[in-house]
Structures are given as C-alpha cells and as structure tokens.
C-alpha cells in the first residue's frame, strides 16, 4: 500500500504554478512522500515530474470529473480522459479516480439520495459513460477507479452498488471515498469489505458524524454543513479509518489522504496531523506515510 495526500486544504486546493512549489514543499515537510497528480495547465508532464522530484515527492493517482449522466457531454469527457490517461501513463501511474460532477439539486440537499429509490435510467446513462471512459484509458494501461462524491449523482451506497453491478470489473475498478460514503449514510469499512477485490485506489477521509446528522435534521445545504466543521483531519473525526485500512492492507494500491477543509490553523498543521495519525496507526505502510517511516 502506498500513501499520498491531495493538498485540498491549501488555498485553491494547492493548484496553480505560482503557488505549487510552496505547497509541495509543505507537503514534503508534513511527512508525505507522494502527492495527488494535477499537472498544471501548460506544463509538460516531464517538467511536472521534475518539479515533484525537486521536493522529493512521487506522483499518485489524480482525479477526473465529468457530466457522466449527459450523453451530449461524452465527446469532451472522452477527450479529457485520453489526456489524463496519457499523463498518468507517462508518470508511471496505472489508476485514476473518475467521478461525476456536482449537481445543484444534490448540493442543495446533500447525502439525501439514499432516502429514495435509485434513478435507474440515469444510472444506466452514467454506466455507459463510465464504460466508454474505461475503454479510452485501457490502451494507456490506466484503470478507471469509480469514485463516489456527495453532491453528485454517484452519492448513495445504492447508486454506487448499481453502477458496480452494471460495469465490467475487468475495466472498471472502485475508487471509494470513506468520508463521502459515511456522509451519505454508508458504513465505509463494511462497504470496503464487500468490495475488497475491486478496490483499485482509495480516498481516506474523516468526518464528524454529528455535523452530518445535524445537516440532515435541519435540511442544510452542502456549504452550510462544511462550514459547521463536517470535515476532519484523520483521527479527529468519527470514522473507523484504522479498520478501513486493515480491510485493504494486503492490497498494492494507492491510498490518497484528503481533508476537504482544514480544522487546524494552517494547511501544514492539517497535513502534519494526518501524517502523524498514519505514522501512529499504520507504521507498516512505509515511506509514503510520514517522515522517518
């Protein structure tokens, strides 16, 4: 198992060539040895690899999102998938996360899709888009890892289960997010246990379940729940993350740590908190976990 971080807690998600070197330096200082791949617009893959190397960092699987439910959006989606797969292959990566874009109706009432039966017609459109993306990526040796996200049309456990059943395990792997699973009402460790052999990569994220429960009770929207402190650094929330890691510990896969919004005073402190939890909880994960591991 290899561990990286997606620097989401930095301003702007740590993106942009003008801030990237500072972000990467802090990622390394926090104790991580790898970072979510996000090649800046206009920067070649070789230059990006060199930039990571100057900070002692390795690339980890990145993220592609699209309007998977809209057939008219497929040409743009597939072109983006070709570019992303080629970049990942050049970086020596064999997986990438694929998610649906966030939609207004789900952002207004997040994590509520499990209250109703899945929209099978829409999910079948999504499944076809996922299949097409997987087929575009396969020649590059890159496997699509289907990702769940609250606020998207792949949100509830039932929606994710439907899509897994409707797609070929040989083409479409699973790239679940522990925090988004729990926010939507699923038990992340149990879900990972059921699909252990299909997991190709994992987003490791912690949440405060009391905030999610309040959001449901008071019908709060996505930003309102986030503002109340939904997201937490690893070990500061309520999820059984150690159990989640134990489920996939024998697998040679990437675990990408995410904190959508830091609860520590600075991004560096946030990342150090996560690296420290990993070092204490899963010291066998190796160098990509924390400094000195």
Image (tube, rainbow, N blue to C red):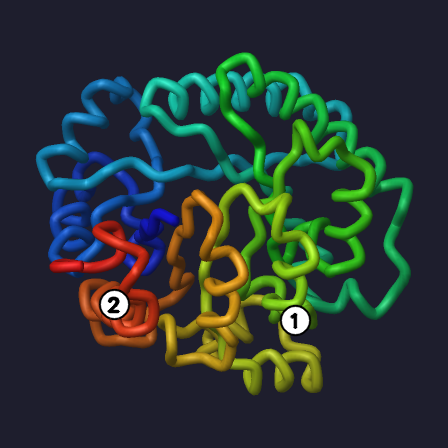
Cβ atoms at labels 2 and 1 below 8 Å apart: no
In the image, 16 versus 83, the foreground residue is 83
Q: Residue at x 56, y 17 (%)?
A: 79
Q: Which residue lies most toward the top here?
A: 139
Mark 1 surroundings: few (<14), some (14-19) or many (≥20) residues within 10 A:
some
Front residue of 247/278: it is 247
Q: Position of residue 233 (x, y in %)?
A: 36, 72
- 1 vs 174, left or right, is left
Q: How many marks?
A: 2
Q: Between tags 2 and 1, which lies in front? A: 2
Looking at the rendered structure, the secondary structure element under dot 1 is: loop
State the residue position of label 2. 279
- Say whether residue 82 is visible: yes
Which residue occupies 61% across, 66% down? 188
224 lies above or below 158: below
Residue 112, position as x, y percentages in the image: 75, 68
Numbered circle sitting on residue 13: none
Q: Quadrant of the C terminus?
A: bottom left
Circle 1 is placed at which residue position? 187
Quadrant position of residue 158: bottom right
Res 101 seen here = no
Q: Is residue 159 left or right of residue 155?
A: right
**Measuring 39% from the left and 29% from the top, which residue is drawn there?**
93
From the viewer's perspective, is residue 137 above or below residue 281? above
- Say which element carries label 2: helix
Picture residue at 58% right of the left edge, 46% below the top: 199
Neighbourhood count class around disc 2 (C-alpha, 10 Å): few under 14, some 14–19, many 20 upward: many
Q: Earlier in the sequence, mark 2 or mark 1?
A: 1
Give coordinates of residue 208: x percent, y percent: 50, 80
Q: Report how far apart the C-alphas of labels 2 and 1 lie in the structure.
A: 24 Å
The x, y position of residue 292, in whole percent, is 12, 59
């Amino acid at each position: 198992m290899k561990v990286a971080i997606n620097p989401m807690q930095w301003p702007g998600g740590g993106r942009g060539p003008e801030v990237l070197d500072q972000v990467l330096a802090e990622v390394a200082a926090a104790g991580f040895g790898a970072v979510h791949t996000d090649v800046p617009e206009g920067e070649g893959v070789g230059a990006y690899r060199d930039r990571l190397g100057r900070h002692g960092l390795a690339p980890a699987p990145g993220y592609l999102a699209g309007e998977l439910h809209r057939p008219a959006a497929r040409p743009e989606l597939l072109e983006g998938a070709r570019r992303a797969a080629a970049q990942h292959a050049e970086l020596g990566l064999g997986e990438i996360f694929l998610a649906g874009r966030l939609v207004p109706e789900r952002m207004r009432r997040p994590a509520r899709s499990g209250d109703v039966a899945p929209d099978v017609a829409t999910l079948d459109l999504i499944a076809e888009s996922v299949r097409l993306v997987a087929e575009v990526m396969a020649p590059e040796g890159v496997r699509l890892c289907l990702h769940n996200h609250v606020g998207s049309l792949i949100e509830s456990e039932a929606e994710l289960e439907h899509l897994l059943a409707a797609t070929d395990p040989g083409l479409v792997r699973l790239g679940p997010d522990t925090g988004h699973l729990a926010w939507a009402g699923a038990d992340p460790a149990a879900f990972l246990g059921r699909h252990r052999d299909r997991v190709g990569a994992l987003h490791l994220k912690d949440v405060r379940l009391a905030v999610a429960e309040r959001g449901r009770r008071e019908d709060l929207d996505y930003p309102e729940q986030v503002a109340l402190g939904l997201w937490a650094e690893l070990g500061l929330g309520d999820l059984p993350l150690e159990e989640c890691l134990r489920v996939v510990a024998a697998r040679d896969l990437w675990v990408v740590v995410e904190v959508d919004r830091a609860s520590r005073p600075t991004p560096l402190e946030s990342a150090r908190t996560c690296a420290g939890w990993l070092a204490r909880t899963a010291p066998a994960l190796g160098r990509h976990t924390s400094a000195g591991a």
